[in-house]
Amino acid sequence: MSKILFSHLILIKKIENILLNLKVISIITILTVSTLFLNTNALYGQKMSYPKHQIGLGYSSFSASGLTYYLEINKYSALQVSLLPYYTSTSNNNLSIIALFGGEYHFNIFRTKEYRIFAFAASGAGHLERSETTFKIINDVEIRETRVDLNRIINFGTGAGLEYKINRQFIVSAGIGLMYQLSDKANFSEFWDRNPSGESFLGIGGSISFRYAF
C-alpha cells in the first residue's frame, strides 16, 4: 500500500509541475492574443465583426497537436494555439507523460466565403517522459530505484495551407511546408519526434485540423 501511495504522490507532483508550466505559457499566449486584438480593434474600428472564434482538434508537425483554439483577428490575420496534456500508466510503477504546446500565425493570401488560402509561421514544444520504478530488498532494507527517460522537442515551421468551410460552423484546414526540429537523444520516442537520435531534423511537415466556429 505504501508503494502505491508513494507512486501516486510522485505522479501527482509531476503532473502539477507540467500543468504549472503549461499554465504560464497559456497566460502569456492569452495576453499576447488580447494585445493583438485590442490593437486590431483600435485600427479597424468598433463596428468590425472580428474576432471570430473556433475550437477543435488538430495535428501539426510545425507547432503541436491536440485541442486547438483558433482566433480570427481580422480578414488578414489569425492565431492558432494547440495543447495536449496526456499521461498513461501501465502499472503503479510505470508512467508515461506527454505534454505538447504550440502556436501558429496565419496570414490570408486569398479568401472567399468557403475557401481560404493562407501562409503561416509556427513554433511549438513537446515534453515526453517515461519513468519506471523498481523495488528490491537488500539486507532486509527496501531500496527504491526510479529510471526516468526524457525527450524534449522544439519545432519551427513555415508554409501554406488551405481551409474549407463545410458550413457556417464546421471548418477543415490542412497545411504543408518546411519544418525544423530539435530533440533530445532519447531511449524512447513517439511519432512527434522525427529524429530520436538527438540530431536536428529539417524536412517536409504537414498539418490538419477540424474546428467548430462559435
Image: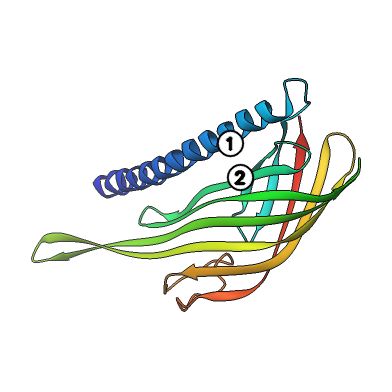
Q: Amino acid at mark 2?
A: Val
For the residue carrying disc 2, how many other residues have a C-alpha within 10 Å: few (<14), some (14-19), or many (20+)?
Answer: many
Residue 77 position within the rendered picture, expressed as x and y whole percent measured from the top left: 72, 43
Disc 2/disc 1 C-alpha distance (Å): 10 Å
- Please give the label number shown on residue 184: none
Q: Residue at x 42, y 70 (%)?
A: 184
The scheme the figure's colours follow is: rainbow
Q: Quadrant of residue 170?
A: top right
Q: Please name the residue that numbered disc 2 is placed on.
A: 81
Asked whether, in this view, residue 99 is left or right of residue 209, the answer is: left
The quarter of the picture where residue 64 lies is: bottom right
How many marks can you see?
A: 2
Which amino acid lies under the numbered mark 1 shown in the image of this protein?
Val
Task: Identify the element where label 2 is drawn.
Answer: strand
Q: Position of residue 175 (x, y in %)?
A: 75, 59
Residue nearer the viewer, 135 or 68:
68
For disc 1, the marked residue is: 33
Q: Residue at x 47, y 36 (%)?
A: 27
Quarter of the image for the N terminus: give it: top left
User: Tag 1: Cα neighbours inside 10 Å, few (<14), some, or many (≥20)?
Assistant: some
**Foreground: disc 2 or disc 1:** 1
| Residue displayed at 61% across by 45% down | 81
Q: Residue 166, position in %: x, y?
A: 89, 43
Q: Position of residue 50 (x, y in %)?
A: 74, 29
- Quadrant of the frame with the C terminus: top right
Q: Are marks 2 and 1 in contact (CB under 8 Å)?
A: yes
Q: Residue at x 74, y 36 (%)?
A: 74
Q: Secondary structure at mark 1?
A: helix
